[in-house]
Amino acid sequence: MERIEFEKERDYIEKVKGINTNKNLKYNIFTMGCMLNENDSEKICGIVEEMGYTKCDNPKLADLIIFNTCCIRENAEEKLFGKLGELKNYKKEKGAIIIVGGCMMQQKHIQEKLHQSYPYVDIVFGTHTINKVPEDLYNILQKGKKITDILDIDGDIYEGLPIKRADKTKALVTIMYGCNNYCTYCIVPYVRGRERSRNPRDILKEIEGLAKEGYKEITLLGQNVNSYNGGEGYKFSNLLRDVEKIDGIERIRFISPHPKDFTEDVIDAIRDSKKVCKILHLPLQSGSTDVLKKMNRKYTKEQFLELVEKIKTKIPDVVFSTDIIVRFSRRDRRGL
């Protein structure tokens, strides 16, 4: 994994911006899935707006239509293909550029279906290639050639991407990417790669900038947020304590933690904080130790309950939320 400044890609932003000068072009974006996808879409919006596009709510009024997909939800494929089907005639009439990206695009069978059944899609990009959107769009505008920009390996971390935030007081801040847990029901490690943590200096710089802009609430994001590893012994608990010190930030939230990584130092950091919200999302997934083992969750029912009691003892006013899978069958998501 390499840390790369987005500045290297700005030449293509300027080239596309030059092509779009005085054209009053509009874009529409449709986001599926989790807060990480929402944060990715904010970055896509930031990139696109710097290239001269203005956001609109109706895809059939847009010159650029973007789908940021998720492959966790069961009906996500149907929803995507249904919406793409609705745009076929609009594409023919207006010549809008259609871009499809996100988790779903990391799956080979989805890529193949797009090429076969939806050949009017112009750009397909994956979870590791958001940074390539300006270059891909420039090549479409100049050459008209369909582009598939997918990396099957773990991606690099790009800093300095433009961002258009959806809220004026609450901000999403991704602190790490990917997951190493390989729960048997989950495809995330295969579409977002293994864990890569941002440098703590970059995270704190971003949050300090948000505080100066008037943001009051920060949500720290990661597929497995409390396994954050900033290097040289710098852990998630250290990050919580450092974000606590930033003037202007009043509330700190984080999602989603894994019970196996909810260590004593993390509990203590939450207990000691005046800013970390005492509302913790702690996914259980199953109340059966046998099923948890089949899920490869790496904790037992008893260990989960012990953790809850430990947190309640140290943080008496804590409030919990959780996830529970009510129907589970073991299968390897790599085959999907």
Image (tube, helix red, strand yellow):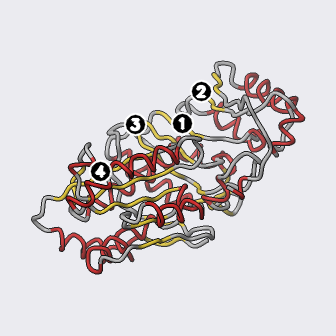
Q: CA distance from mark 1 to mark 3?
A: 11 Å
Residue 8 falls left or right of residue 49: right
Element marked by disc 1: strand
N-term mark: 2 or 3: 3
Mark 2 / mark 4, whichever is N-terminal: 4
**Of tags 1 and 3, which is closer to the observer?**
1
Residue depicted at x 38% and y 44%:
211
User: The disc labelled 3 sits on which kind of residue?
Assistant: Lys
Q: CA distance from mark 2 to mark 3?
A: 17 Å
Is the C-beta separation of discs 2 and 4 under 8 Å? no
Q: Are the residues flagged by discs 2 and 1 in contact, CB closer than 8 Å?
A: yes
Q: Identify the secondary structure beneath mark 3.
A: loop
Q: Which residue is mark 1?
A: 253
Alpha-carbon neighbours of circle 2 within 10 Å: few (<14), some, or many (≥20)? few
> CA–CA distance between discs 4 and 3?
28 Å
Can the viewer see residue 14? Answer: yes
The C terminus: image quadrant: bottom right
If you read the primary sequence from the N terminus, does the residue marked by circle 4 or circle 3 appear first?
4
Q: Residue beneath label 3, please?
A: 216
User: Is 9 or 241 nearer to us in this picture?
Assistant: 9
Q: Which is more toward the observer, 257 or 250?
A: 257
- Disc 2/disc 4 C-alpha distance (Å): 34 Å
Residue 266 located left or right of residue 80: right
Q: Amino acid at mark 2?
A: Ile
